[in-house]
Amino acid sequence: MTHQTKKMSEIIMEMSERLLRHPDAVHSSEAAHVALMFANFAWNETVGLGYAREGYRSAWEMIEAENPEMWSEFKSNDIDAMIDELVQYKKTHYPDDQRRILTCGIPEGNVRVEWLPAAASGVDSRWEMQLYGMVRTGQREKGINFLRETRHLSRNEAAKQVKKIAADFGIG
């Protein structure tokens, strides 16, 4: 199966399982979520959406607070090394796949990944991800204001663009 036909959720699961001491075992919800989160970080880092890793710390620390023992399920507790391993894995196994992960989680026990295609030439990918994230999370008014401020669109034009993005997500 080529990466174009392989579901993003399958790829991210494949990557996250590489971090676990016993990939085929049943894992705590916390370990599964953190492994998935690290795979998400690594993927987006390889497509130019990396942020300072320290900025992610609060996300996994909240999960860790629920179950500090989750780290025993990982093959390492060196977070940077684990993310680096996944970055290399992605570069090796999916070098041409430039999809960008917008959301990633485990609702109702199933891994779900929402992604955007590779950024079009000349498009500021971080800007676009920020806008799409606002619309996806129901912050349409914030998205409209973001477009007005950053692209100097009229309120009407900005609202049209936000409505189109929402429709693309099926949340029109």
Image (cartoon, rainbow, N blue to C red):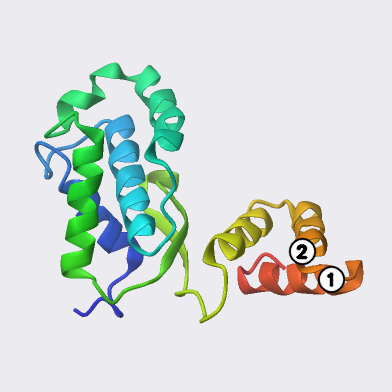
Q: Quadrant of residue 122?
A: bottom right
Coordinates of residue 102 in the picture (x, y in percent): 50, 58
Determine whether, in the image, residue 25 is placed left or right of residue 59: left
Coordinates of residue 7 in the picture (x, y in percent): 32, 69
Q: Label 2 near label 1: C-beta < 8 Å?
A: yes
Amino acid carrying mark 2 in the image = Leu
Q: CA distance from mark 1 to mark 2?
A: 6 Å
Q: Quadrant of residue 153?
A: bottom right
Mark 2 Cα within 10 Å, few/some/many (few <14, many 20+)? many
Secondary structure of the residue carrying tag 2 is helix
| Residue positioned 51% across, 81% down in the render | 121
Q: Number of numbered discs present? A: 2
Q: Which residue is at the front of the view, 17 or 143? A: 143
| Residue positioned 46% across, 65% down in the render | 115
Amino acid carrying mark 1 in the image = Leu
| Residue positioned 30% across, 80% down in the render | 4
Q: Quadrant of residue 159?
A: bottom right
- Mark 2 highlights which residue? 147
